[in-house]
Amino acid sequence: MINLTTAATQKVKGILEQERESIPAGGLRIYVQGGGCSGFSYGMVLDEAADGDQVFETDGIKVIVDPMSLRYLEGAEVDYKEDLMGGGFAIKNPNATSTCGCGHSFQAGEGEGGGGGHQH
């Protein structure tokens, strides 16, 4: 399960409304890929679900995750914050053993395979 805070849900709803013509059945795809200063990095994109994807629904918003990313994102929470520098999404991930200062990359425990076999 991946949760969206109220602020993130409202922001994604607004973005999906703007893109409704090009992605009529779309949702927010969240994924993990190799790279970043801590070993893995997060990505988010508007997309439609494909075969094999896990789809969660939060307040009418589809959250789409591929099976490989799901093992790193299970139980994560997506938030959206506005500040003087602008706004952005942030992921609070209980599976991350450490994160970097940018908040977009993380390290997983050694029991997760150390990142060797992950491709996206």
Image (tube, helix red, strand yellow):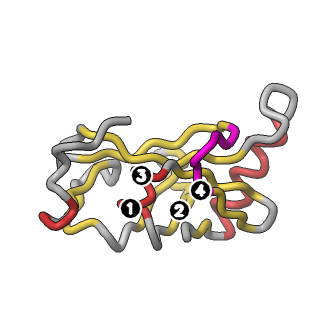
What crowding class fits label 4: few (fewer than 14 Cα within 10 Å), some (14-19), or many (20 or more)? some
Q: Nearer the viewer, residue 93 or 56?
A: 56
The kind of residue tagged 4 is: Gln
What crowding class fits label 2: few (fewer than 14 Cα within 10 Å), some (14-19), or many (20 or more)? some
Residue at left offset 45%, top offset 46%: 31
The kind of residue tagged 3 is: Ser
Q: Nearer the viewer, residue 110 or 13?
A: 110
Q: What secondary structure is found at the residue carrying circle 1?
A: helix
Which of discs 4 and 2 lies nearer the camera? The answer is: 4
Answer yes or no: do the residues labelled 3 and 4 have beta carbons within 8 Å? no
Q: Is the stretch drawn in magenta largely helix, strand or loop?
A: loop
Horizontal arrangement in the rendering, residue 106 relative to residue 26 (left or right)? left
**Count of numbered marks:** 4
- Residue that numbered label 4 is attached to: 54
Find residue 117 and report its horizontal and vertical position in percent: 22, 43
What crowding class fits label 3: few (fewer than 14 Cα within 10 Å), some (14-19), or many (20 or more)? some
- Residue that numbered label 2 is attached to: 78
Mark 3 / mark 4, whichever is N-terminal: 4
> Eyeballing the image, is 6 above or below 102?
below
Find residue 12 and report its horizontal and vertical position in percent: 70, 50
The kind of residue tagged 1 is: Arg
Q: CA distance from mark 3 to mark 4?
A: 10 Å
Q: Residue furthest front?
A: 51
Find residue 62 and report its horizontal and vertical position in percent: 71, 55
Horizontal arrangement in the rendering, residue 26 relative to residue 45 (left or right)? right
Which of discs 2 and 3 lies nearer the camera? The answer is: 3
Mark 2 / mark 1, whichever is N-terminal: 1
- Residue that numbered label 3 is attached to: 69
